[in-house]
């Protein structure tokens, strides 16, 4: 798959320090070995018996001197929320919190976790410690959908957002999700981003609050990206096929197919990417988090070692 090959080469060039804190999991160890062998990133693991078998750097969460430094950082960061030095030490018993502090302090360049840790814990720790980027107002997610030659009629690489985080975004939040996805598409895709703000209605053919939500979001995105290819409200078929678009919105200047699909809700996004993945065999890489001030990516607890490798490659490409 050419895009993944390209992302692998870019990861090798950037070669960042990526922390995989779940060092007790065999999939993580297998992935760490593969990443190290391919020189995709400098892997850092939490010190454990299994890590001694690998030629990787380690961080020891039980090192008292290190823990004291991390506790001070956490205290300074969260004291306005009532965190004391004592509670900071207690919070660092959580490996995810420890990993985020390592990232916050700049001792690693990115964190990939979630193989054995619930997504809510990963995301809440990232939000509290890493925080939202200066250029964003919320954190969202996307999936990079990679298709083989049998299913690449509309392109080999598409972006679906938001499929993992924001349940029922407002118009303003939906616009922010779209703007973040546009930036990600510019970083990852070779083609220029073409955004489709998806709806059950094309060109406001139906009257409903959900249609209005997408219409307003589209107007916001267009005001921020006046030179970009953007269409909304639009149904999926019209965003992909110029003949369908001509029938449903004959005055549109958009040129299908779109390659960035902004779903109006988490329901539609999550169901949509899984339908495409299951019925077409597309490789769904993600969820890729966007909007954080430093790269953190969450894994599915059912992930394979290969999927961990893919997540590290994506994270490496976010370390710029």
Image (tube, rainbow, N blue to C red):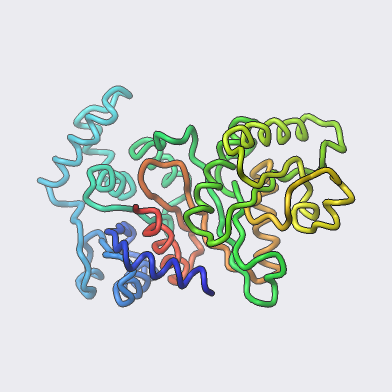
- 303 relative position to 43: left or right: right
Compared across the picture, whether 4 is left or right of 268 comes to: left
In the rendered image, the quadrant that contains the N terminus is: bottom right
Q: Nearer the viewer, residue 99 or 249?
A: 249
User: x, y percentage for residue 99?
Assistant: 29, 49
Q: Quadrant of residue 224?
A: top right
The image shows residue 41 at horizontal and vertical percentages of: 31, 65
Q: Residue at x 26, y 65 (%)?
A: 42
Residue 58 vs 82, above or below: the answer is below
Above or below, 99 against 170 in this view is below
Quarter of the view holding residue 93: top left
Left of 131 or right of it: where is 214? Answer: right
Q: Residue at x 44, y 44 (%)?
A: 123
Residue at x 60% of width, y 36% of height: 175
Where is residue 227 shown, x and y percent of the image? 61, 42
Return the x and y of residue 284 as percentages of the image width and height. Answer: 57, 63
The mark total stands at 0
Q: Which residue is at a point 83% across and 43% down the rendered structure image?
A: 251
User: Which residue is at the far left?
Assistant: 65
Front residue (pair 193, 104): 193
Position above or below: 147 against 16 = below
- Is 253 situated left or right of 73 in this image? right
């Amino acid at each position: 798959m050419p895009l993944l090959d390209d992302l692998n080469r870019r990861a090798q060039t950037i070669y960042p320090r990526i922390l995989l804190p779940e060092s007790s999991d065999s999939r993580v160890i297998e992935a760490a070995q593969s990443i190290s062998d391919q020189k995709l990133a400098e892997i850092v693991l939490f010190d454990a018996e299994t890590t001694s078998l690998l030629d990787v750097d380690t961080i020891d969460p039980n090192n008292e001197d290190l823990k004291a430094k991390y506790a001070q950082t956490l205290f300074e960061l969260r004291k306005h929320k009532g965190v004391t030095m004592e509670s900071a030490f207690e919070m660092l018993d959580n490996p995810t919190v420890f990993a985020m502090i390592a990232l916050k302090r700049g001792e690693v360049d990115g964190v990939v976790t979630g193989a054995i840790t619930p997504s809510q814990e990963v995301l809440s720790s990232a939000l509290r410690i890493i925080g939202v980027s200066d250029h964003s107002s919320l954190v969202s997610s996307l999936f990079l959908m990679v298709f083989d030659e049998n299913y690449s009629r509309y392109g080999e690489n598409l972006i679906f957002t938001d499929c993992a985080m924001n349940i029922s975004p407002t118009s303003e939040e939906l616009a922010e999700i779209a703007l973040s996805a546009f930036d990600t598409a510019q970083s990852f895709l070779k083609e220029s981003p073409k955004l489709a703000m998806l709806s059950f209605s094309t060109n406001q053919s139906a009257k409903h609050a959900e249609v209005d939500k997408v219409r307003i979001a589209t107007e916001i995105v267009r005001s921020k990206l006046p030179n970009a290819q953007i269409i909304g409200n639009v149904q999926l078929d019209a965003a992909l096929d110029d003949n369908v678009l001509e029938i449903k919105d004959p005055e549109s200047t958009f040129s299908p197919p779109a390659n960035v699909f902004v779903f109006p809700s988490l329901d539609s996004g999550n169901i949509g990417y899984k339908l495409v993945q299951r019925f077409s065999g597309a490789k769904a890489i993600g969820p890729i988090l966007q909007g954080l001030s430093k790269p953190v990516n969450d894994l599915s607890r059912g992930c394979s070692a290969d999927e961990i490798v893919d997540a590290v490659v994506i994270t490496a490409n976010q370390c710029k």
